Image (cartoon, helix red, strand yellow):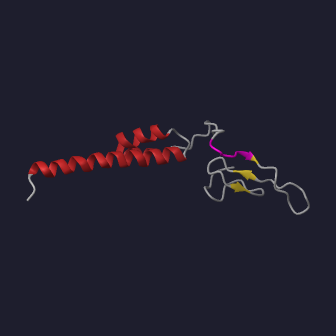
Amino acid sequence: MFGAETTSTWLYILLVLAWFAFGYWGATIAHKKQYSFWLGFVVGFLGGILGIVVLYIIRPNKKRPANPHSGERTGYDPAPTGAKGAPRRTKVCNMCGNLVEGKEQYCPYCSERV
């Protein structure tokens, strides 16, 4: 039914698609950890499953400042007030951008230290 050439052609197509899938997977992991999207793509594309494991192991990039044009909020949000008008210590998680209220030291959404 199918010749050897047709089978090998489909195999090559699947391998190229797998490379691009690993590249995209690596890019999304790197972006979540505040590294370059393209760096993650290259590591995932060239490294395959080993590159994905490396990207999962590395720590988030804390030195990269938040992009002021991305709409991300960082630091303290002084607007909310407590029951007696005293300002609550509401913080914004630098990793996921969710509000963390009170004296919590870790974000309840992504478990990063605030």
- Horizontal side, residue 91 vs residue 59: left or right: right
Q: Residue at x 74, y 51 (%)?
A: 91
Q: How many marks?
A: 0
Give the residue drawn at x 10%, y 56%.
2
Q: Residue at x 48, y 48 (%)?
A: 28
Q: Is residue 74 magenta?
A: yes
Residue 104 x, y percent position in the rendering = 73, 56
Specify whether residue 10 is in view.
yes
Residue 110 percent location from the top left of the image: 60, 55
In this view, the residue in front, 12 or 26, is 12
Residue 102 drawn in magenta: no
Query: Quadrant location of residue 66?
Result: top right
**Viewer-side residue, 31 vs 108:** 31
* In the rendered image, the vertical position of residue 98 relative to residue 19, given as above or below: below
Please give left or right for residue 101 compared with residue 25 in the image. right
Residue that extends furthest to the bottom in the rendered view of this protein: 83
Q: Position of residue 68 (x, y in %)?
A: 66, 39
Instruction: Pinpoint residue 58: horizontal percent, then vertical percent.
Output: 51, 43
Magenta span: predominant SS is loop
Magenta segment range? Answer: 70-75
Nearer to us in this view, 66 or 113 = 66
Name the image quarter holding the N terminus. Answer: bottom left
Depth check, front residue: 78 or 48? 78
Q: Can residue 57 be seen here? A: no
Q: Is residue 3 left or right of residue 84?
A: left
